[in-house]
Image: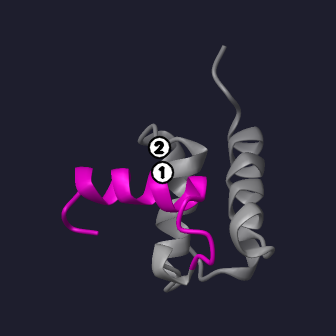
Amino acid sequence: MTQTFEHWYAEVDQAVQDVITLGVDDLPDMDYMSMYEDGETPAQAAQIALFNAGYTPDDDPDPDSTYTQEFDEFTDADPGL
């Protein structure tokens, strides 16, 4: 069963809140529907949104956090980030 956009977006929002205590609606606008349609996971979409907002793993007070580790893996896979 395919995850609905609404459920996917809620998971993106929660992933962002887990990092910065703000939600995706507090970040600059992004085309979340395209990310959903392109098959990005909620974690990947959250990382892209945070990066677009200027948040980087260097801002993360816990270098061992899941966000920092996943961001490093994500940016290694896409040198454009």
- Mark 1 and mark 2 in contact? Answer it, CB < 8 Å: yes
Q: Residue at x 45, y 37 (%)?
A: 39
Q: Position of residue 4 (x, y in %)?
A: 71, 33
Q: On the picture, is 78 further left or further right than 35?
A: left
Rendered-image quadrant of the N terminus = top right
Q: Residue at x 77, y 70 (%)?
A: 23
Q: Which residues are magenta?
A: 60-81
Q: Which residue is tagged 1?
A: 35
The verdict on residue 77 being magenta is: yes
Q: On the picture, is 77 further left or further right than 59?
A: left
The verdict on residue 73 being magenta is: yes
**Viewer-closest of 36 and 70:** 70
Q: Label 2 sits on what residue type?
A: Glu
Say if residue 23 shows up in the picture: yes
Residue 63: give its label. none
Rendered-image quadrant of the C terminus = bottom left
Residue 40: give its label. 2
State the CA–CA distance, disc 1 to disc 2. Answer: 5 Å
In this view, 44 is above or below 21: above
Q: Residue at x 47, y 51 (%)?
A: 70
